[in-house]
Image: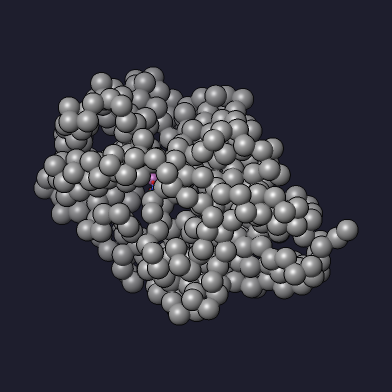
Amino acid sequence: MPVKITQAKVIVTCPDRNFVTLKIETDEGIYGIGDATLNGRELAVVSYLEDHLIPCLIGRDANQIEDIWQYFYRGAYWRRGPVTMSAIAAVDTALWDIKAKKAKLPLYELLGGKCREGVMVYGHANGQDISETLEEVSKYIELGYKAIRLQTGIPGLKSTYGVSKDKMFYEPADANLPSENIWSTAKYLKHTPKLFDKAREKFGFDHHFLHDIHHRLTPIEAAKFGKSVEDYNLFWMEDPTPAENQEALRLIREHTTTPIAIGEIFNTIYDAKDLIQNQLIDYIRTTVVHAGGISHLRKIAALAELYQVRTGSHGATDLSPVCMGAALHFDISVSNFGIQEYMRHTDKTDDVFPHSYTFKEGMLYPGDVPGHGVDIDEELAAKYPYQPAYLPVNRLEDGTMWSW
Ligand code: EZ4
Ligand code: CO
């Protein structure tokens, strides 16, 4: 029996940070929600949904998730890109939520069932200097984390990626016009291996340590970095070099066995396929929200499985609890899951998005309620209006624009 889509609306709220949420309602009274947040470009996705997708959704059969996906992807003529794919992702996630609620099953049951008990996550330890970062690592270890990302300030640079005043709730979108960071590759390459040297000296080798380079190095510099930290056994180095130039990864691979994770800014399987098929990465970091939803992410994971590439989905605070909930159902049901990033949301955010997922001893569990298990409290959401917020930009010391 068809389930008719009767209404769809976009909810924009800022409980400590901006989130864009799509809510799709049906004639059976069942609704579903999907995350459509694109950090620093939120309102472009709102318009894409309100002006272009929602009018085409009304009256369609909510059961036909794949057909609706194809309708919006192929049917638009203009394909791919973060705005388009975040909007399609929100529709897809909301429709999976509806289908699972209608079946009275947690979403992972429709995706083939659980492949594992829980989802290993990693948290973010960051500090102005090495000793501050190590203190943060201790806190994560006390909280039970098995995997931790380490970032630290660099002597001689006023600010850098991954380091903020607020520790547990690190938020990079910090100003109503972009703030500016200054970058020096030489200073970074000199300092960062010391962080991992001290961390292994202090904590040993029982925990997974990760690191995000945030697209800042050239291929040969990234190769050099990977080599310089091999003794510290990193779980991965993330975004070592901008991935528009995918051939560059071959050069890095030839020089280092430090595993590589890429994909948080990818939107489709086409962005990832060469890196996967040539085995130039070890982890693919595409997300439910920015890469076309559950349906498309599962296709990426299936391709990656053929090449022993595992998933390591992005999970920063700018992916809403709706995305996190959906991601956990994906993570628990794909065979080649690797790890899930998990930056905690603030209490204000969690209050607006009541959810069934829970954290215990370094793992997240999606919970067993029907659907993806995340809801939105619309009354509360309305109390926190949108506030413009940009991600920073990055310049070299001589003023040259660089990758943030
Ligand atoms: O810069 O989510 O691995 N995590 C990251 C994040 C991203 C932000 C961008 O919105 O690189 O901190
Ligand atoms: Co990253």
- Locate the N terminus and report the quarter of the image it occupies: bottom right
The answer to whether 17 appears left or right of 102 in the picture is left
Above or below 206: residue 191 = below
User: Which quadrant holds residue 363?
Assistant: top left
Q: Where is residue 374 in the image (x, y as percent from the top left)?
A: 56, 59
Residue projecting furthest to the right: 1
Q: Quadrant of ligand 2?
A: top left
Residue at figure coordinates x 33%, y 51% from the top left: 404
Determine if residue 204 is in view: yes
Q: In this view, does 102 lie to the left or right of 325?
A: right
Residue 394, image x, y percentages:
28, 54
Viewer can see residue 322: no
Q: Residue at x 25, y 21 (%)?
A: 231
**Would residue 195 appear left or right of 12 to someone viewing this image?**
left
User: Image quadrant of residue 307?
Assistant: top right
Residue 133: percent from left, percent from top: 20, 44
Q: Out of 103 and 26, give the one closest to the viewer.
A: 103
Q: Residue at x 23, y 41 (%)?
A: 138
Horizontal arrangement in the rendering, residue 197 relative to residue 301 (left or right): left
In this view, the residue in front, 401 or 277, is 277
In the image, farthest residue toward the left: 156
Q: In this view, does 218 lie above or below 328?
A: above
Q: Across the whole image, how many numbered discs are drawn on residues?
A: 0
Name the residue: 35% across, 39% down.
145
Q: Please name whichever residue, 44 or 351, is drawn nearer the observer in this view of the structure.
A: 351
Colour approach in the figure: one colour
Whole-percent x and y of residue 212? 33, 41
Q: Is residue 43 above or below residue 373?
A: below
